[in-house]
Image: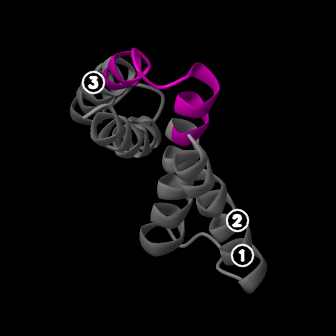
Amino acid sequence: MAWVVLIVAGVLETVWAVALEASKGFSRLVPSLVFAVALALSMGGLAYAMRSIPLGTGYAVWVGIGAVGTAVYGMVAMGDAVSVARITCLVLILSGVVGLKVLH
């Protein structure tokens, strides 16, 4: 169960990062509220998962999911640059996340 919660918390990290950008410095109410709720749920999920997952593993997986999710969202929805090198780096991050889970 902790791993499922950790994965959801990592996805919520992507949500709050996207909402933070959309809030335009907290000047827009709805994205600011989405940011606050997603941040609280993401941190709460990370805290719950780390009851049974070691700190280094849990935090690295959480950050990796959030970073990859945010980068992919940026490329798909925001027009960020897409290149073989960027995709390769994201695959390497995902490989590390999977490796941390498998080797746990």
Q: Nearer the viewer, mark 2 or mark 3?
A: 2
Separation (CA) of disc 1 from disc 3: 30 Å
Please say whether residue 52 is visible from this viewpoint. yes
Which disc, if any, is residue 41?
A: 3
Q: Position of residue 5 (x, y in %)?
A: 29, 35
Residue 92 tag number: 2
What amino acid is found at the position of numbered circle 3 in the picture? Leu
Residue interval drawn in magenta: 45-61
- Any magenta on residue 24? no
**Crowdedness of circle 3 by 10 Å Cα count: few (<14), some, many (20+)?**
some
Q: Residue at x 37, y 24 (%)?
A: 49
Q: Residue at x 44, y 19 (%)?
A: 50
* 20 relative position to 37: left or right: right
Name of the residue lying farthest toward the front: 103
Q: Which mark is residue 98?
A: none
Name which residue type carries label 2: Leu
| Majority secondary structure in the magenta region | helix
Q: Which mark is residue 88?
A: 1
